[in-house]
Image (tube, rainbow, N blue to C red):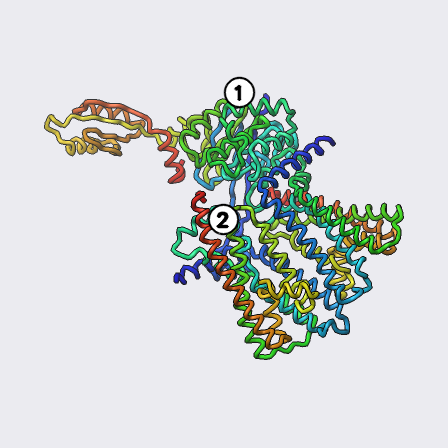
Amino acid sequence: MWYYLRLIGSFLRASIQEETASRVNFMLNILNTILSLTTGVLGIVILFHLVTTIQGWTFPQTLALLGIYQLITALQNLVIQPSMNSLGGIGGDAWTGRFDYTLQAPVSTQFLVSFQKWRLWGLVDVVLSCVILGIALTLLGGQLGLLQVAMFVLALCISLLIVYAIFLLLTSASLWQHGVPLVWIFTSFMQLGRYPVGIYPGMLKLVLTWIVPVAFITTVPVEILTKQVSPIMLVGGAGIALGLLVFASAFFRMSLRHYTGASS
Amino acid sequence: MTEPHILVRSLSKTYHVPERKEGLLAAMESLVHRRYRDVKAVNDVSFCIEQGEMVGFIGPNGAGKTTIMKVLAGLLYPTSGEVRVEGFVPWERKTEYLRSISMIMANKNRLAWENTTLDSFKVLAAIYRMSHAEFRSVLDELIDLLEIEQLLHKLVRNLSLGERMRCELAAAMLHRPRVLFLDEPTLGLDVSMQLRLRHFLAEYNRRVGATMILTSHYMADVTTLCSRVILIDQGKLLYDGDLTGLAERMAPFKLIRLSVDDSQGQSMREIEGAVLSAKYQVTIIDRADRRLTLRVEKARAAAILTHVLGELPVVDISVEDPPIEAVIDQVYREGVWL
Amino acid sequence: MNLRGGWELIKKSYLGWMASRGFFWTLTFGWMVPSLLYLFVWVAVAGQGQIQGSTRDDFIVYYLCLIMLNQFTYPVCNWTVGDSIRMGRLSDWLLRPLPVMFEAIASDIAMKMVCTPFAVTVTVVLAFFLRPAVHFSPQSVLFFLLAFLLAQVLRFLMAYTLALLALWNSRADALLDLNDSLVFLLAGQVAPIALLPGALRALAAVLPYRYMLGFPIELLIGRLSTTEIWQGFAWQCAWVIGVLFLYRFVWKHGLRHYTSVGG
């Protein structure tokens, strides 16, 4: 509905104004993004300085994986994380009581919690990630069919939906126990997705594929581009994404009821 | 019979609160074993408020006033009871309902710290679906009433406390709520600011016909704005009516101020002695140069007056009700024995 | 030296943070993840053989030590100082009969008292599962302890000085993230310094970051030659002194600026 789109525009504008309130911090944030990206790339370069493959992944493939990881993280840091972060943790809205004002607004609370804050300099990150991805793909050579690209975009959307759903789930949890930034635990786990999941010992690999589906989020889109992936994976992924989304929304509603003291 | 604007029936709310004793050892212990306490914050409270009324909630700290307001605002689910505001059940938080109410809480900021006031207002206008024209006209009115023209383009974090309160108030009223819940709105403000705020609230009530519930520790807020008060102590509703009635019930006393002439042979000490020796209950609560202030039971006032005028060299006399501020102050300090 | 005041500060911070221990253990976990990640990466890469003389076990030992050392030396004042300056708490500290740095040190110690049990547990569990072969000589342990002390001082002072930049511009905390990134790259987290390509290795030997994290561990593992040990210590001391001067400069001028602007 137009109302919601206009609201997002309003939030976007307010966030830009907030960010540009300090020029120094703005520039430093961009610098930081560039630096963290460079660090990531350098990490891989240093590694491949000494070996030629990691668990069967070549340098361009690993670089592509990093690119996807950065892209998803960048999109997540664009809106999902800043919005939900303001809710949980120490000093967050739930902690200080500002959440009461969010609850008072005549808009779906889930909508507000998901879109209220944007970090525009995350766009720089998005662009840079695409650049890295582009470089990796060029190094790989080969052609990219239209079908492949379409599947890739779909996989990316699925990954983003999974990330959103997990964020929603964990942010809801912070309404129960104020001050534990579960989201941070998740993003820490996500970091493990920078490298091929095969490097982890058995148990951890299982956890990272099915419980905290980091492998799904980063590896599947890459494999679509660099190797062969059967459409069944995509269908399965879509199923997981939708399931998680429904579950997360329900849990959020339940957490709101708990926060406002409903005896269940 | 039309339903009252705000209807509360048998409202109760019990909290489950963790507690921890002081010290390092107890802190370690709380790691393994959490203790809880049941706190009955609101206990079977009922009242009705008509459209346009301005009602003051008074009572000691922790009495349950804020809890009741939060339930009315839809921020809290009650443990039991029935509540309807504007025909809605508050905790269902229907959009229509939320658009017609507003709650102002002291020390909790609605405005974004790193943005200008006007920018924050614009976001609120978008949320409450105000058209540009509506927004401008309401804003002009609020600028006028609260004198915030200079503050619109300042960053919220650079505002002083008084300035911020005014802007927070404006932010809360942008959507022209018909029901207002005000929790200590004048906390920490200087006297002139308090006056301005009271004037603003009275004006708003007059123009919009909004219903207001107000809690405040500044009795002047309550006495100036509210014709009706509800007294809450330890979760229970103890009094619901006008202020004078409360004073009557709480402090059924009268104050008699005497000026005496001690040049006729009787010293002040003897005069006082004469007053106190009368067979009526009299307390001397103040004595100055040649003046005495007596507190007497209302019922005996006439008899005591006769005695005093007859026996003592009275030069000037006045009979008053104790000031309501003193009465309420006593409530807050000593609790209530009704 | 107001030591009793200092101890009370520590106790106050500790109690405050124990109340939010879930938060801080999550934080600790977050700090451990990069090291864990590279532990697994290098282990996978080393496989059954060696990388430039380091076996799988060597990497495991290296990274487990890194996790523990990082935990002990991590500069908590990164956030606490900047936040306090922004919130105006600095004025409180300036009024106290305690050096202002005490507050930051106390918070640091208190936070580590809260977080270290968690980190130690995780490290021990990992060591149990991965079972690396470990042999430390008494001499290397001694060197390690000395370097550890200096590393802690260096890392704290560096972060504290950077955090004090908030006295001028209250939103310069991205600079601290930058510092962290450099630590990550050049202090031996991405890869043990010895394995860095030539240019980076030379850079790392000269910048302070290696001496905050990597150097003590290299001493512990005992792979450095005598010349390298002396060189390392020389650089470490030089940097400690250098950052000390930097700190005093920043503090003096920053405080003047802060108090002239009105805080």
Q: Give the answer, above or below, for where A199 lies relative to B280.
A: below
Q: Say if mark 2 contacts mark 1, CB within 8 Å.
A: no
In the visual, does C57 lie left or right of C165? Answer: right
Of all chains, the one bearing label 2 is C
Q: Residues within 10 Å of mark 2 (few under 14, many from 20)?
A: many
Q: Which is nearer the eye, C195 or B174?
A: C195
Q: Position of residue C233 (x, y in %)?
A: 55, 71
In the visual, does B299 lie left or right of C240? Answer: left
Tell me which corner region of the image, top left, top right, bottom left or bottom right, holds residue B244.
top left
The residue located at (77%, 74%) in the rendering is C49
Q: Which is nearer the eye, A35 or B11?
A: A35
Q: Residues within 10 Å of mark 1 (few under 14, many from 20)?
A: few
Amino acid type, callout 2? Leu
The residue located at (55%, 76%) in the rendering is C142
Q: How many marks?
A: 2
Q: Position of residue C155 (x, y in %)?
A: 55, 61
Q: Position of residue B128 (x, y in %)?
A: 63, 30
Q: Which is nearer the eye, B201 or C181?
A: C181
The residue located at (64%, 51%) in the rendering is A32
Of the two numbered discs 2 and 1 in the rendering, the one whose residue sits closer to the viewer: 2
Residue beneath disc 1: B207
Q: Secondary structure at mark 1?
A: helix
* Disc sitting over residue C167 in the figure: 2
Marks 2 and 1 belong to one chain: no
Amino acid type, callout 1? Arg
